[in-house]
Amino acid sequence: MLAWGDMLLLRVPIYRRLYPSVKMLIDSFSPERRSAFKAVVLVQHPREGAYAFGFVTSDVLLDAPDGKREMVTVFVPTNNLYLGDVAMVPCEDVIATGLSVEEGIRIILSAGTAAPARLPRSGTPVTASRASRPAPR
């Protein structure tokens, strides 16, 4: 039934352009897809010295003029979990929190009121492939 609905929507010109992107976004936040967010981290955002909670979504190897650089893609939600900024951050600039993804979502949805009183600061660089490891306490 859902596949039939998808096919029907893809026949409408406006939906044909927007629907695949919207569907991908909705699928990313689906409870069945546990792998969308790899870890809860802190990154300097929106400016240096200010930190925001974010979710690591993938590893990226950046081919820069000065050589290759390991980066992670971090989704930094705004006031609505479905909206936010996607930042490519050098691994060494990402702070692992040791929080579970569920705890991170709870913090965002509670406007920060569910944040723990103390977060461990790990010197270990974060990558999506190592994100499942908790930060040392």
Image (spheres, helix red, strand yellow):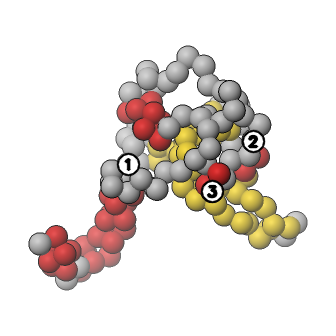
Q: Is residue 44 visible?
A: no
Element assignment for label 2 = loop
Residue depicted at x 46% and y 56%: 35
Tell which circle, 2 or 3, labels the residue nearer the N-terminal end.
2
Instruction: Choose mark 2 or mark 1, whichever is in front.
Output: 2
Which amino acid, mark 1?
Answer: Tyr
Q: What residue did someone put label 1 on?
A: 82
Question: How many angstroms separate mark 2 from mark 1 (CA)?
Answer: 28 Å
Question: How many angstroms separate mark 2 from mark 3 (CA)?
Answer: 13 Å
Which amino acid, mark 2?
Answer: Thr
Q: Which mark is residue 124?
A: 2
Crowd tier of the residue under label 1, counting other residues whose Cα lies within 10 Å: few below 14, some 14–19, many 20 or above: few
Along the viewing direction, whichever of 136 and 46 lies nearer the viewer: 136
Along the viewing direction, whichever of 125 and 109 lies nearer the viewer: 125
Residue 133 percent location from the top left of the image:
62, 44
Residue 109 lies, with reference to residue 84, above or below; the image says above
Residue 124 sits in which quadrant? top right
Q: What residue did someone put label 3 on?
A: 129
Instruction: Choose mark 1 or mark 3, whichever is in front.
Output: 3
Residue 2 sits in which quadrant? bottom left
The answer to whether residue 44 is left or right of residue 82 is right
Residue 16 percent location from the top left of the image:
27, 78
Residue 34 percent location from the top left of the image:
42, 53
Q: Is residue 64 visible?
A: yes
| Total number of numbered discs in the rendering | 3
Tell which circle, 2 or 1, labels the residue nearer the N-terminal end.
1
Looking at the rendered image, the quarter that the N terminus falls into is bottom left
Crowd tier of the residue under label 2, counting other residues whose Cα lies within 10 Å: few below 14, some 14–19, many 20 or above: some
Residue 4 sits in which quadrant? bottom left
Element assignment for label 3 = helix
Residue depicted at x 19% and y 80%: 7
Element assignment for label 1 = loop
